[in-house]
Each structure stands twice: as structure tokens, then as C-alpha cells.
Image: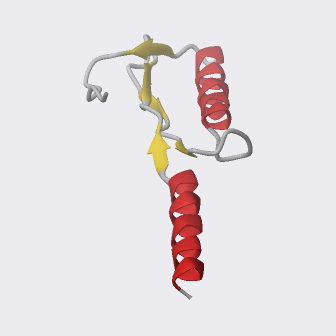
């Protein structure tokens, strides 16, 4: 009985470790003519190495968002962003 309970605890800890979430830093963009600001992110990701909640997927969503705004004339800015790390 004790070994079975211990095994279940280890499995649960392993599953929770995979699901621990992080977020990407937000990206701020500014349109130089209208002075309007837009934000991409933050995007959530887990410790999983693949899938829709992976870090690669989060970074791809961020790139797609930034690309869309840059096509509309927005430029990345760094002012006012909290530094994480």
C-alpha cells in the first residue's frame, strides 16, 4: 500500500511539473504617425516541449502578431516594459 501511494505521488508531481506555466514578455509597438500603441502577448506556455502550449508555439504566436502590426506600419518600442528575468 505504501509503495503504491508513493508511486501515485511521484506521478502527480511529474504531471504538475509539465504543466507549470510561464509567459512570454509582452511586445509593445507604436505607430509613428498616429502614436497609437499595440501590444502582442504575453503568451502562456508550459514545460511541454511540443504542442500548442509549448514555448515554440508561444513564440510563433508572438512573431505572427508582431508581423501583422509591422505590416500596418507599427514599430517595436521598449519604453515602459517591466523587465523580467
Is residue 2 or residue 68 the one in the foreground?
2
In terms of image quadrants, where is residue 54?
Answer: top right
Relative image position of residue 72 (x, y in whole percent): 62, 19
Does 42 appear above or below 18? above
Q: How many marks?
A: 0
Relative image position of residue 25 (x, y in whole percent): 42, 31
Is residue 48 or residue 69 the one in the foreground?
48
Q: Residue at x 46, y 17 (%)?
A: 31
Is residue 64 or residue 72 the one in the foreground?
64
Q: Residue at x 56, y 58 (%)?
A: 14
Looking at the picture, the colour scheme in use is: secondary structure
Q: Residue at x 43, y 11 (%)?
A: 32
In terms of image quadrants, where is residue 73?
Answer: top right
Does 21 appear above or below 28? below
Relative image position of residue 84 (x, y in whole percent): 30, 29
Q: Please state if 85 lies on the left or on the right of 17 as rendered.
A: left
Which image quadrant: the C terminus?
top left
- Most distant residue in the right direction: 51
Relative image position of residue 61 (x, y in whole percent): 65, 34
Q: Please state if 28 lies on the left or on the right of 14 as rendered.
A: left
Q: Residue at x 59, y 30 (%)?
A: 62
Does 45 appear above or below 9? above
Which image quadrant: the N terminus?
bottom right
Is residue 77 or residue 24 the one in the foreground?
24
Amino acid at each position: 500500500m505504501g509503495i503504491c501511494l508513493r508511486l501515485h505521488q511521484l506521478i502527480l508531481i511529474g504531471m504538475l511539473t509539465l504543466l507549470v506555466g510561464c509567459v512570454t514578455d509582452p511586445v509593445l509597438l507604436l505607430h509613428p504617425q498616429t502614436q497609437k500603441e499595440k501590444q502582442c502577448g504575453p503568451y502562456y506556455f508550459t514545460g511541454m516541449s511540443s504542442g500548442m502550449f509549448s514555448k515554440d508555439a508561444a513564440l510563433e504566436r508572438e512573431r505572427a502578431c508582431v508581423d501583422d502590426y509591422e505590416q500596418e506600419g507599427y514599430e517595436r518600442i521598449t519604453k515602459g516594459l517591466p523587465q523580467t528575468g
